[in-house]
Image (cartoon, helix red, strand yellow):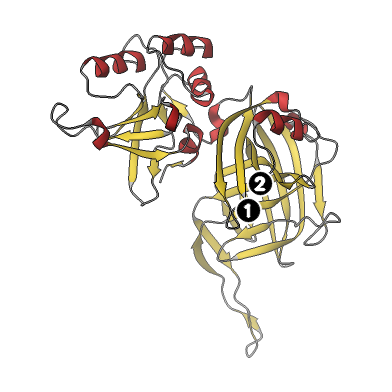
Amino acid sequence: MFKLGKSEFKIKNADLHAAFTTWDDEEIEFVWCIDIEMEEGKLILDDEEDEGEGNFEDDYEDIVSPSLYHENGFRIDDVHSWKELEGVILEWEDRENDNGEDAGYIYTFEHDAITEGKIEFLKRNGNKYLVRWSGMVEDEIPFEFEGELNFSGILVDSASISNQEELKSAMMQFIDMEEFKCVSESSYDKDDGERHNTWRCVPKDANWEVMNNIISNSDIKVTEEKVNELLNKLKVQFPEEIVSFYGMYNGGEPSKYIFTDKDGDEYIIQSFIPILSNTKKDIVQLTQDFRNDRVIEKWFIPLAYEAGGHIFGVSVRSKDYGKIFYWNTDYDYYSEKFEDHVFLLEDSFSVFLENLSDD
């Protein structure tokens, strides 16, 4: 629950993650970040005093979806594992602490600074932390959040690190990297032409709720070893992040199922296809059938069904390995080319999952 003045809001999403950034060999930053979104609700506001009458007007209400966040991050000394945050207490007596770290912000109609704050990590439960965050907004309005934050891993952005071995070496001074696996990797060019590499690293022993998406109605349990064994039948290999996903969720229905592309078009995921099943066609059987009927190319492996009957899949060819594609199946397979009906959606499976929503 989140309380802001006289108002109360239910929690929609609550995320805790670490951020590791390097600009060059001399500038390195490792901080913790919090991002909490509330469901839409009534914000009760006080009217100002009527100077002529000497009394107060009635309260009035507005509908808002508040956010409570700490996007610039804060350091936590003497913590070398993401599992060791229980019992940590951080306090701000002003907008910034002695390290120059801000106390956070609350968004309703605009972004208002927290001018006094206290964050308490009360208890860890798996990859979630029960947290209490309380304080004052702009020295005027009290707030308090108490609820579970989902630890979603570490986001990395670096101009000086080019591979995972360098990444692990650089981060070991801040966090135990043996607890993590990197599930996505990409790069981009900044406005000044500088090349940056990005990674997302998630806890090895946490379930896929780190992607803030609950998968229900999964099929029979399989191990990562079994996933790779089944893929050998197709003579392909999946990226590690997809193997990890199927080792935890063998297909199923996502709680967040809407993917919106860069043009604003929406795609509805009905379900992820199991890698192995005793009751329905799994990835191996489906791929073999499509290949035998010569309706797909060998580089495309089906992963999920769209509500309209079309299919999401992953590329296993070298030039776009691991990228997620959408196959519009509504055409004549024997007179038209597969390549004319398959479109790139996202650069990796983990980013594809992160960009799913429920509204």
Residue 128 can be seen, yes or no = yes
Please state the horizontal and vertical placement of residue 144, each as a whole percent of the image.
68, 52
Q: CB atoms at circles 2 and 1 under 8 Å apart?
A: yes
Mark 2: which secondary structure? strand
Say what amino acid the circle numbered 2 marks.
Ile
Q: Nearer the viewer, residue 306 or 190?
A: 190
Say what amino acid the circle numbered 1 marks.
Leu
Q: Nearer the viewer, residue 289 or 218?
A: 289
Q: Nearer the viewer, residue 165 or 221?
A: 165
User: Which tag is nearer the camera, tag 2 or tag 1?
Assistant: 2
Mark 1 highlights which residue? 68
Q: Nearer the viewer, residue 320 or 82?
A: 320
State the image quarter where residue 306 is shown.
Answer: top left
Mark 2 highlights which residue? 34
10 Å crowding of disc 1: few (<14), some (14-19), many (20+): many
Mark 1: which secondary structure? strand
Above or below: residue 213 compared with residue 57: above
Residue occupying the point 51% across, 33% down: 350
